[in-house]
Amino acid sequence: MGRTLVKRYRVGILGATGLVGQRLIERLRDHPWFDVQVVAASSRSVGRAYSDAAQWCLDGEVPPGVAGMRVRGCGPADLAGCDLVLSALDSATAREIEPRLREAGLPVISNSSAHRMMAGVPLVIPEVNPAQLDLVRAQRERHGGGFIVTNPNCSAIGLALGLAPLHRSYGLKRIVVTTMQAISGAGLDGPRALDLLDNVVPYIAGEEEKLEQELAKIFGEVEDGVVRPSPLEVSAHCHRVGVRDGHLEAVSMELGRSVEPEEAVETLRGFTAPGDVGNLPSSVPRPIRVRDEIDRPQPRLDRNAGEGMAVVIGRVRRCPVLGLKMEVVSHNAIRGAAGGTLLVAELLAERGLVGRSGA
Amino acid sequence: MGRTLVKRYRVGILGATGLVGQRLIERLRDHPWFDVQVVAASSRSVGRAYSDAAQWCLDGEVPPGVAGMRVRGCGPADLAGCDLVLSALDSATAREIEPRLREAGLPVISNSSAHRMMAGVPLVIPEVNPAQLDLVRAQRERHGGGFIVTNPNCSAIGLALGLAPLHRSYGLKRIVVTTMQAISGAGLDGPRALDLLDNVVPYIAGEEEKLEQELAKIFGEVEDGVVRPSPLEVSAHCHRVGVRDGHLEAVSMELGRSVEPEEAVETLRGFTAPGDVGNLPSSVPRPIRVRDEIDRPQPRLDRNAGEGMAVVIGRVRRCPVLGLKMEVVSHNAIRGAAGGTLLVAELLAERGLVGRSGA
Amino acid sequence: MGRTLVKRYRVGILGATGLVGQRLIERLRDHPWFDVQVVAASSRSVGRAYSDAAQWCLDGEVPPGVAGMRVRGCGPADLAGCDLVLSALDSATAREIEPRLREAGLPVISNSSAHRMMAGVPLVIPEVNPAQLDLVRAQRERHGGGFIVTNPNCSAIGLALGLAPLHRSYGLKRIVVTTMQAISGAGLDGPRALDLLDNVVPYIAGEEEKLEQELAKIFGEVEDGVVRPSPLEVSAHCHRVGVRDGHLEAVSMELGRSVEPEEAVETLRGFTAPGDVGNLPSSVPRPIRVRDEIDRPQPRLDRNAGEGMAVVIGRVRRCPVLGLKMEVVSHNAIRGAAGGTLLVAELLAERGLVGRSGA
Amino acid sequence: MGRTLVKRYRVGILGATGLVGQRLIERLRDHPWFDVQVVAASSRSVGRAYSDAAQWCLDGEVPPGVAGMRVRGCGPADLAGCDLVLSALDSATAREIEPRLREAGLPVISNSSAHRMMAGVPLVIPEVNPAQLDLVRAQRERHGGGFIVTNPNCSAIGLALGLAPLHRSYGLKRIVVTTMQAISGAGLDGPRALDLLDNVVPYIAGEEEKLEQELAKIFGEVEDGVVRPSPLEVSAHCHRVGVRDGHLEAVSMELGRSVEPEEAVETLRGFTAPGDVGNLPSSVPRPIRVRDEIDRPQPRLDRNAGEGMAVVIGRVRRCPVLGLKMEVVSHNAIRGAAGGTLLVAELLAERGLVGRSGA
């Protein structure tokens, strides 16, 4: 990669005991650049060993290096000594905590929704819109070196990544999307078995608004230090289904011109990440994969494509109403959360936008 | 009802051992007008007692009057003595059998897809388009007294019933609908547990085409002895989910004019069945029910509304792309199949379009 | 029934907003003897209309007569004017509340575990051990007319009812039982979807102890004003499975003598409730039903037998270790909770052990 | 390992398109000793490319080296050139095919039940009873160099491995076991979604008999060229549950003497595989793992322990009836089938009981 890996980055994790926090810790096991330095959570967990405080619910055991760490609070003093902070806080907590850490000069890469729609805060999918990271410099000046960069909502990431090549080639104008979202997207306090057994719940608080707003910002342009949203019109219907991991999204779209399904598939298959993104540790070769089978993608079969970092698309076909339609699966907890956040952090490091320890 | 119930109707059931056949038998238990006279199925079952031949999978036991009946074949001789025939055959078998019964002078009310799109065959939801039954007279003339009337596809029925008052008041122009369909819709040979556990399957063979074509015919006009389809544009995304009964559909629509959600709700709530439909034995008071809760309708909680004959609508709200959107639940095996077929048969009887035994 | 139904009983329901409370209210809709007079719950709900306070999760709507009732607290003043109280409180709350109501002279029929194992408190399944109700008289004397009668644990009821005829005929000596329990048994704060999807949880807090202890008491003898437990040895393995309603129990047993499966089936089928029990409103004709199919009973197919009040038994066969084994299904929320409690209350009324209003 | 890996083994797979066949192919990807030489299946698949013929349902893609292989039939000519054959045939087919391959001089290591209970055929779990492999020599003499070795039933393997150290230390006398088995255990033609959604099925054809008989043989002694079964008494209750992978078993046991749970746990934790087994490619360090959490093991969380080759035990506690009880989870498709079969094949290779290509 042409980087001299003399130094490593010390990472703090906010909301480390939650589901996204657990996924972050899992993916940082043996990470080539990042070391978990601090695990931080709410006061209920502070002072306890991580393995006691976290109700670990992933395959296998807590990574040994983290299991015995004492959980700290989320204040600037707790995170002192970290080169960067990955935030998996709930929105209400993030709204208060993340700006305080930024004021303390820390780079905060956040999976929370709290600051996503702020005009000066990048909302980044590295393969799609890395240019939004330019906003980091202005933030650093205003906030003593600290800044906040955000990762989109779990259903927005998969969809935006899957739509990106079509937008680039033809221009997206209108989208109607219906999501069937996995329960892990709701975190450890997610739905009751009573609600999802033999059922689908046609509502997720705030989700449709997020999807509708974030897509426009993701595809927006940086101008005068803010992101000007794309004039894209989006309508979302969001559902929770009895699937553990992997969001499935059925999308109909109107593009700038009429595009045949075959051409769209070719465009999707031709997609590659920009140069410095493709070489990041969490990058995967083909971040968009198109399947030809008539009944794919399916959450259980396709969520782990590219170790959970690729989106899988299928059933690309004509839409009698908007022109083109297709189905998209992405791993909400990896691509749509922990893995996505980590990829942003890696890109910031690669671009020299976070300092390295001892540097 | 003003009818003198001196006589009753003798009913034959085709495909009586399947899931829709079982539902028909369940709903004919204690029916005020109809008596099960013949249970007919494939050669595999012929000659066996119904309770042996059918793998009964509904609550409770096979109704005692039917349990001991010998299963017959599906030919005209087998059905001799019936006043009408309810068909729950698979499409391939129906294509061959139903016309033969019609030629034998029998009225066939079919849940099969085989003849739904034939121009001279009514595709009827009694509350919505009873006028299509006028086509019966021409069929009777051509076919020696016999005729075929069809019931729409299980996902088309719920949707069309839910949309009917909006179509009537404002005119439907374009629809994008995503279905999340229950496994009972696939019958006894439906999906494997392996495929639906922790998963959603984004494909059901032929379903999207059915939904797209049938809606236009349901809302079509009878003209010159055929149905002229409505110019409605429909795009469907169909999914199978791990729900036993109850199809959930997320629909965005463009109407003839801009309609506020509150007005749409009022229109939906104001819907009532035409006079002679509302008094049928399988009719329910409010066939369209609108819920105000933010997270309804849900399949498990709402599928049995009106004993499974009502559709339940919720989340009526603005659609940023097409104008209006909402969610619809209907019981696929009752409203969308057995109950719907039965209601058509009752209406035919009420209108004197089927003869009564001994008459 | 030979009773003159001039007067009716006014019933108070404790824990009315919970899952068992909802089932009680559902089953009291149109009850021939009992009227819901008071719905009582925790302070969070007090003062709100029942339909607002309760997160109703049964089919259909809250019964109209109850929907608008104001929820009251659980103190004696709140329940004043009731002839009897049905308790669906959690154990900790019941421990404190139920004795206070008894001291206030109220009959309390409780589904809670709090007082089940107290020697002077009956633990009753009306078809099995109605004699324990004799303990009521002593309680009434000690507590100013009030008393507590309890309903066993949801997995103990189905098992004890299913074993009763075998115990009566041959004497139960040792039992090894493995339960696969439905999620509704855990109430509204039951397991997360995350825990039960694609999983079985081999532990339910306190459940194995309850099952092991309660069976001995249910089959015990009343002697000197207390119940002497049967010397029965019971070993329970309890599991939570992804089933909505209906506990399945696999049981191996050693009887007082060797019994062939055919004889056991005959004994089970011959069981009937004692005379005054069989005529109660919540009684069903054959409270024990034996199925011959090799793969029954199954929770989904058999839980509603006898409107949820019958237990269904199958696979009665030789056990190479203990002698005889079989499978039992019962509806945990009806037979095992609300319906069971109600049946006890009805028997108390029938036997004149609760006063009637105005009497 | 002290072996000179100059040569490799050419492996044929019978029933390669089924679920166990797929697992075998997955686990042979990059295997250090074995190369897939032939994929064989029923006539329906013969001649097709493997990736077309198999309905692949594991994560990821068909291994590239196998995807394009033409599927062959299961006769001796088809398998010519193989050093050994791994069989994942259904029982009826295996009964006919496997002896024919043995007569052709081929070593057959079979996951099928067809020959498990034949006195001269080893029924092997390498960590538990490798001595049964001695029977191979006699078979080779009788059958021109060919032989059959079998792998126990998927629920017997996990249980026998988990019980082995207790048997060795204290002697097992009586066992009552209840299984909750995953759907993958039923293969590609397994249960319908309709049967397992919101349900448990208390019957698996032939399964209880297998479990009861195989345990006695696994723990039997080789004597005079046959296995004398252990006098162990076993009673099994078998259930199918809505879990994808991982059988859970609740077991009560009587040992040769009274053993406290703590001592049993120590004995279980002290278990290691015999020397030449522990170094095999598919071996894992601690094949028996004991968890201390009150609610473990659980299928979803523990099935992948040791890459699916370890059994996980928990809730070791006193049984009021038989003395000791516990819960066991093992991955039915890996430890209980493909991985178990492969481990047997590896042990045969290690012991020089199968010839190597070119040797």
Image (cartoon, coloured by chain):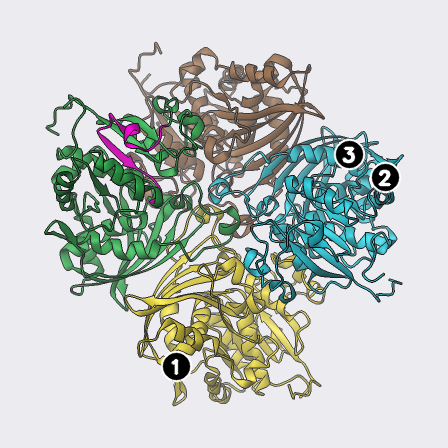
Chain colours: A yellow, B green, C brown, D cyan
List the residue tagged with mark 3.
Answer: D216
Given residues A10 and C196, the one toward you in this image is: C196
Going by the numbered disc 2, the residue's amino acid type is: Ser
Mark 3 or 2: the one toward you: 3
Q: Is residue C282 above or below residue A184?
A: above
Given residues B259 and A139, the one toward you in this image is: B259
List the residue tagged with mark 2.
Answer: D169
Is any atom of residue C88 visible in this view?
Answer: no
Residue B245 lies, in percent from the top left, at: 38, 43
Question: Which of the two discs, 3 and 2, labels the residue nearer the N terminus?
Answer: 2
Q: Could you say which quadrant of the image residue A167 lies in? A: bottom left
User: Is residue B312 found left or right of B46 in the rendered image?
Assistant: left
Labels 3 and 2 within one chain? yes
- Residue B82 drawn in magenta: yes
Q: What kind of element bears circle 1?
A: helix
Q: What chain does badge 2 belong to?
A: D
Q: What chain does badge 3 belong to?
A: D
User: Is residue D210 found left or right of A305 in the rendered image?
Assistant: right
Q: Which mark is residue D213?
A: none
Q: What kind of element bears circle 3?
A: helix
Going by the numbered disc 3, the residue's amino acid type is: Ala
Residue density around tag 3, few if under 14, some if 14–19, many if 20 or more, within 10 Å: some
